[in-house]
């Protein structure tokens, strides 16, 4: 059951515990096409497990013709590909909501793009032979903990139509090196386009089920307005643009300081359902078109830029993206009880002097 | 001027902005002798600067016989060594103080140990020829911002007696790879034993001064009880032990759950002034001796372990280290106005059931 903090109420000790162990990407990290491993956002739901790669096995079982038990070498010897993919936490923006759903209190920084190397999941599922009556494929990680009074391994499911997509991968390298422990060593699932909770880390089992999966994490990741509602599941990333805050920061307030004249503003935009079609920059409420650059890849963010003619004084600079389906980031908060998918536009306070 | 939050008062928006961009090491990271790059703690005072390694130069000037301007290749062609060093933020533990000094709100996790590769600073200072009248060596980073209403580059100084220590290095690799941008690419200072603010990142200049350096960051890092006091400077890391929280976590409260029986507890301990001589584990206030293991290196943390015979019920597990000079971690907060060097013992709530 999600608790709410009243408008203006400070961050609780429990939220701070989560904030100091999970890791955002400082927004100047948007400068890199591919995020350095040590700058990529990281949310660890329970704990980072210690996995011994020599004894580790991946089980593929349930409603399959041929259950498989793969070693890491088995996985690594399969056809490989490397794809840049942007990942964002579904809770990104949660702490900007009012009233505030109490959980990991992200502001804007739970995002990153890495080059993931691995093997298509489809090939493995084809080798195992998914039954025709399979409705969910359940992915289990080695991380365990308690949530909703239930001790559990972290688990998420995908319907076969998603699991069999060509671009879904089991990955063992990030930016050309073996996964570091916190990013899912030895093997994690990558489902391009989806929010981060789907990319199950420390994979141990893939189970084909003939009945719908109703695990805890599927209940938690839904768009609802009140307890007890059914709502819609959280799936793909909504459209979003972020900018590198221009100029230099004040250490404490993070207000930005720049000189007057042309201030180049750059950032990245991404969307899990359609290509990014447009980015606008708003200065003091007046919106202008940004110039779109190249995408880092078909499943990764796209660069954009804007030359701001800055005049002396205090300003608020915003940015917003629109996808090819016409979905635009909101300027009013898209509130929901669990604080999911809040793509409210970024606001940066800038002093020009 | 440091603001204080009253006991029990929630974390402010400004503190949260800092918490979501700076990065702690989840405490299960204590399991690794050498912290993976993407798990190492990170505090970026202003912004991560974009440094072009081709045009970057390191100036060594001021009161020296021969000013030097070194390229990155110049630095890399000098004698090299690789040393594991534990770094901890001077503000680690700040948010556990009451009343709470308002700044980056670390709880316990601002620590990490990396293998740093670089060249001894002493050789470079010898080549430049420090004047006999030098009292401070000032290190300037490429990161800029505003603090105390003053726009400034990040700067810290060391007296020659510290700067010329054999183990002080200018490093260009971390864990065998070029520094990632957020850890100081292309070159950072490493001063084994000192708190993190001393290990200046993105170095651009080393200036020998014949008058004492009085930069902003030296005023900020002092142990004082009230504004206007002189106090003592923050220098070396106080003794501290941390444990890997045992068992599995509750997602939200981070309370730990274990079964009854022998529960192995492990952790690391370090100190910047003397070797770690002793670690104790306290269960519900009763302290017992832990077993000390090997240190990762002379300037790095030391492993320890303890077998806890856990009985059903709710327990509080603590750990504390003592150094070879007899300094022990306090069980009452060592409060100071800027929230520096708080090595109050860790407390972990554990349910045995």
Image (cartoon, coloured by chain):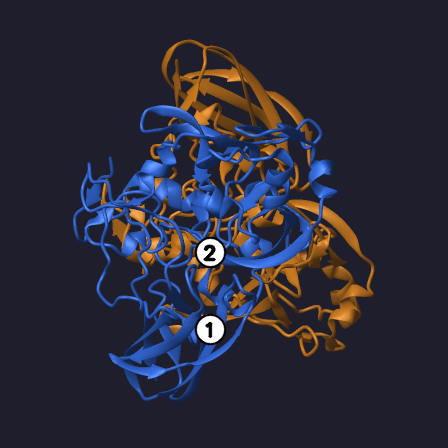
Chain colours: A blue, B orange
**Depth check, front residue: A266 or A327:** A327
* Residue A56 in the image, given as x and y percentages of width and height: 65, 29
Residue A306 can be seen in this image:
yes
Does residue B168 lie above or below A261 as drawn? above
Q: Which element is circle 2 on?
A: loop
Question: Is residue B343 visible to us here?
Answer: no
- The C terminus of chain A is located in which quarter? bottom left
Label 2 neighbour load within 10 Å: few <14, some 14-19, many 20+: many
Measured in 3D between alpha carbons, the distance from the residue under mark 1 to the one under mark 2, in whole angstroms, is: 41 Å
The chain to which mark 2 is attached is A
**Among the 4 quarters of the image, the one containing residue B13:** bottom left
Mark 1 residue element: strand
| Residue at 56% in and 54% down | A167
Q: Residues within 10 Å of mark 1 (few under 14, many from 20)?
A: some
Q: Residue A278: which quarter of the image?
A: bottom left
Which residue is at a point 48% across and 50% down the rendered structure image? B23
Across and down, in percent, residue B335 comes to 36, 41
**Residue beneath label 1, please?**
B152
Asked if residue A219 lies left or right of residue B123, the reply is left
């Amino acid at each position: 059951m999600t608790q709410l903090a009243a408008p203006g109420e400070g961050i609780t000790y429990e939220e701070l515990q989560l904030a100091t162990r999970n890791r955002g990407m400082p927004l100047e990290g948007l400068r890199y096409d591919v995020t350095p491993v040590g700058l990529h956002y990281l949310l660890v739901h329970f704990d980072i497990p210690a996995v011994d790669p020599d004894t580790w096995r991946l089980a593929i079982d349930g409603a399959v013709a041929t259950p498989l038990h793969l070693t890491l070498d088995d996985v690594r010897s399969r056809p490989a590909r490397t794809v840049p993919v942007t990942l964002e936490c579904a809770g990104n923006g949660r702490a900007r909501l009012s009233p505030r759903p109490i959980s990991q209190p992200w502001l804007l920084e739970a995002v990153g793009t890495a080059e993931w190397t691995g093997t298509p999941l489809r090939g493995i599922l084809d080798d195992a032979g998914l039954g025709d009556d399979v409705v969910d494929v359940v992915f289990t990680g080695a991380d365990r903990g308690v949530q909703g009074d239930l001790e559990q391994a972290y688990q998420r499911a995908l319907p076969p139509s998603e699991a069999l997509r060509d671009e879904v991968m089991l990955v063992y390298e990030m930016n050309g090196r073996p996964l570091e422990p916190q990013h899912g060593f030895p093997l994690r699932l990558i489902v391009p386009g989806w929010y981060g909770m789907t990319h199950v880390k420390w994979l141990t089992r893939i189970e084909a089920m003939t009945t719908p999966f109703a695990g805890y994490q599927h209940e938690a990741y839904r768009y609802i307005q009140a307890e007890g509602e059914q709502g819609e599941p959280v799936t793909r990333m909504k459209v979003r643009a972020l900018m590198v805050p221009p100029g230099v920061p004040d250490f404490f307030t993070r207000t930005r300081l720049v000189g007057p004249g042309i201030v180049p503003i750059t950032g990245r935009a991404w969307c899990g359902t359609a290509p990014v079609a447009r980015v606008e920059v708003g200065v003091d409420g007046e919106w202008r078109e940004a110039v779109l650059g190249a995408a880092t890849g078909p499943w990764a963010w796209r660069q954009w830029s804007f030359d701001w003619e800055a005049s002396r004084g205090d300003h608020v600079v915003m940015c917003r993206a629109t996808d090819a389906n016409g979905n635009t980031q909101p300027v009013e908060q898209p509130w929901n009880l669990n604080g999911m998918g809040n793509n409210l536009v970024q606001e940066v306070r800038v002093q020009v002097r």
